[in-house]
Each structure stands twice: as C-alpha cells, then as structure tokens.
Image: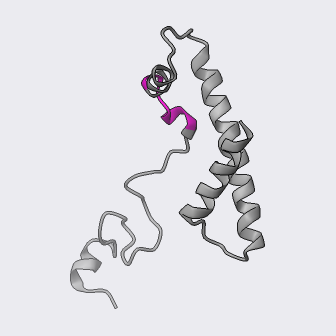
Amino acid sequence: MMTRGQLAKGGKVGPGGQGMGKGGMKRHRKVAKDSVRGVTKGDIRRLARRGGVKRISAGVYDEVRAAMEDRLRLILKDCVIFLEHAKRKSKLARSVCFEVKKFANLL
C-alpha cells in the first residue's frame, strides 16, 4: 500500500522513478568498450624500455595490443579447459599462474 507522499508523487519514489528497485531509469549506463585499449601508449613504451628499445614506430602500438590480446586469449582458453577438467567454476590465481608459466616455457 502506498503512503500519501507516494500518491502525491504519482507513486514514484527515488531516482529510479519506480520505487522498490524495479526497473526504471538508471543513473549510469555501462558502456561496452574494447578493454585492450586500456593498455595505453605509455604502458607499451615502458614495457619496450624495459626490453631495451629506444625508439618505437607509431604502428607498433596497435600490433602490440593485438599480440597481447591473442596471448591473453590463449592463456584464458587453456585456463578454462583446466577448470573444466577440475570441475570448478571459479578461476584461482594459481591456475592462471600455472598457465602463464606454461606459456613462458614455450618462448
């Protein structure tokens, strides 16, 4: 049952406008974005400096992002296979570390 205040407002309460958290307008919308773009140009430059690179061509940044995405996709794919075999649903840090070590041995 609605109170007098809710009836005066047309039954709408709170920022969502529906009351009791059922649907309505949302304050913030989650924007789907390419998460590999989160690896900035500066991040790639720092990694290259650590590897001993002095100058970096402009086209290298997108190639590095693509290579990182491919490597991460392979690691996570193997990690999911490992989890399915162990009959678990949540990834543990040790399983991801195991996969990273396995891929590091391939280099």
Query: The N terminus lies in which quarter of the figure?
Result: bottom left
The residue closer to the viewer here, 13 or 62, is 62
- Left or right: residue 63 compared with residue 20: right
Q: Compared with residue 25, is residue 9 higher up or lower down, i.e. above or below? A: below
Residue 58, by quadrant, is top right
Q: Position of residue 38 (x, y in %)?
A: 49, 35
Q: Which residues are magenta?
A: 36-42
Residue, x 42% and y 23% (percent of image)? 42
- Left or right: residue 8 compared with residue 30: left
- Left or right: residue 23 compared with residue 76: left
> How are the colours assigned in the image?
one colour
Please name the predominant secondary structure of the magenta segment in the image.
Answer: helix
Q: Is residue 41 within the magenta segment?
A: yes
Q: Position of residue 45 (x, y in %)?
A: 46, 21
Query: The C terminus lies in which quarter of the figure?
Result: top right
Q: Compared with residue 84, is residue 37 higher up or lower down, i.e. above or below? A: above
The residue closer to the viewer here, 43 or 102, is 102
Residue, x 55% and y 40% (percent of image)? 35
Residue 67, by quadrant, is top right
Q: Residue furthest left?
A: 5
The residue closer to the viewer here, 53 or 91, is 53
Q: Residue furthest front?
A: 105
Q: Residue furthest bottom?
A: 1
Q: Is residue 75 within the magenta segment?
A: no
Q: Position of residue 39 (x, y in %)?
A: 50, 33
- Left or right: residue 92 compared with residue 14: right
Q: Compared with residue 65, is residue 34 higher up or lower down, i.e. above or below? A: below
Residue, x 38% and y 78% (percent of image)? 20
Residue, x 69% and y 58% (percent of image)? 79
